[in-house]
Amino acid sequence: MPEIADVAGGRTLPGARAAVLGRLWGALWREPVPGVVARHADGATVTVSFADGTVLTGPAATARPFAEPDASFTLTLAHPAAGPAHAPPAAATGRRRVDDPGQLVRALAAALGPHAARLAAEVDDSVANLALARAALPPPDGGPPMLARAAASDDPLAFLEQSVVDGHPLHPCARARIGLSRQEVLAFAPEHRPVVALRKVTVPPRQWYGALPAALWLHPWQHEHLRHEIDWLNHVEREMPARPLMSLRTFAVQGAPGRHVKTAIEVQLTSAVRTVSPASIHNGLQLSALLHKLAAVMPAPEVLPEAGGGAAIVDGAPDRRLGVVHRLVPELEPGGLQLPLGALAAPSAATGAPLVTELVEHGYGGDPEAFVESLAAILLPAVLAPLRAGVALEAHGQNLLAVVRDGRLTRLRYRDFGGVRVSPKLLRRHGIDPPPLRGDVPCDDLEVLRTKVLASAVSTVLGGTIAVLGRTSGLDETKAWHRVAAVARGVPGAEEAGLFAPMLPVKAMTAMRLADDPLADQWCAIPNPLAELR
């Protein structure tokens, strides 16, 4: 990513740095980050000490999940004086203020280990792209609320997905797009609201793996980077205009309102290079059928089924770089809208406040506690019932879509099966034959299943929404969690799932970026606001 000091005259750069630094600070405080040897809280200030004697100090409030620091946010970095590695903070020297997360990672590199340079580059890229995204935002215009604007658009879901600016609220690499230039980010990233021309290429039948006709729908970036390797890639049958959704590589195709297309693109988006594996092509059909079956007998979310996919065979095997998945989007009833729960924190074009504040005002009479209760009422049964049967949904804000009618939440839809885990043992116990699944989806470890659900649905979706409303709508967060607990007490399986345990899991995304295997799940724990409310 080129230098971004010129982005909107640098107007958005300080805020982007502060936002990413805040997420990094929270991760250093709670995650199993290599090199951290001690953490200490002293009133409004917390301190993180590292194995080489370096000490980092900052505000406790900003170390909390979902904190939103202002553009002046800094941390104090103190290098060690000569002496023991575990010397107390008072023995440190060379104190300085740090406002740049990439510079902070580089300053801590000796303690963070061999992958610190990788994390620093990713954090730099995240800052640059977040500054670009915020620079592209027009000032609030005082016009219609976001759901009204969405309803008036030709694709309401794509409109709302492209309103998400900041990305994952806990990940310092939330806007990392490693491999895309600044110009390519502007051309392809959803927050810049582009229309992208997907390229359809017919694949020779003998070189096709999949359940659909032998045709690839290719991201133009991917096509340009691979067409010189394989002759038949140069025969483009046609181009199809499409809008990128939150994940950047998944598209709503114009003229085909019931279809989304997930493409392969060899770009690191947040934490992973987004190719399409043969296992995911196979599992999509199987999991679509399984979740549809569950939804017929329990309060599981409605599924956006995968209709199949395929990949070109190169050198005798399906090539992850040349894969595609087609997803169906069932039509909603008249008057209904759907939005990803991750868009609740997106800025309203009317007011600049989070979109969720408009739902609170127009659907819940200005009562944020009522909104939280409504969200818990559609969310908790929909994730805990499948969990009891052995299906753990990765129920975060990108995978979950809320259906809204007259400004009120009515039900949930679920999409994207890569993070789902399924216990064949529990399915059989509930009289359901487990489908033949591949890769890491089959899992009989109950702790893994519970962690997957609690970390996404409770720690992230409910925790993030409550934090946003506490910051913007005067919500009393303690009272809001009491409302959640009242809902949870009526949901079968809440106790056995660990919903009232002393601690809640959260994915340790920064620690993962510093690990030898950055894609292997790691977790940390935060105090559970439901712990005393069973």
Image: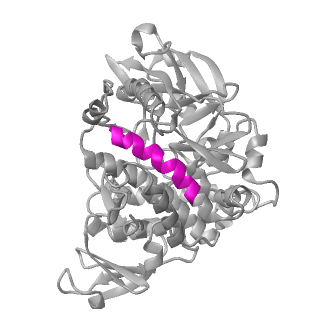
* Image quadrant in which you'd find residue 236: top right
From where the camera sits, is residue 181 visible? yes
Image quadrant occupied by the C terminus: bottom left
In the picture as drawn, the residue positioned furthest to the front comes out as 490
Q: Is residue 120 above or below residue 79?
A: above
Q: Is residue 511 above or below residue 449?
A: below
Query: Is any part of residue 5 visible from this angle?
Result: no
Q: Main secondary structure of the magenta part?
A: helix
Q: Residue at x 33, y 70 (%)?
A: 108
x then y, percent, for residue 208: 42, 14
| Residue positioned 75% across, 35% down in the render | 154
Q: Position of residue 221 (x, y in %)?
A: 54, 34
* 389, 467: nearer the viewer: 389
Quarter occupied by residue 318: top left
In the displayed structure, does residue 241 sit left or right of residue 81? right
Q: How is the image coloured?
A: one colour
Q: Residue furthest bottom?
A: 90
Membership of 248 in magenta stretch = no
Who is closer to the viewer here, 515 or 261? 261
Residue 74 at what x, y percent from top left?
49, 78
Tell whether 50 sits left or right of 318: left
Highlighted range, magenta:
373-394
Between 276 and 525, the residue placed more toward the observer is: 525
Residue 438, image x, y percentages: 30, 28
**Is residue 374 magenta-colored?**
yes
The one nearer the camera, 56 or 338, is 338
Please indicate whether residue 181 sits to the left or right of residue 48 in the image: right
Tag count: 0
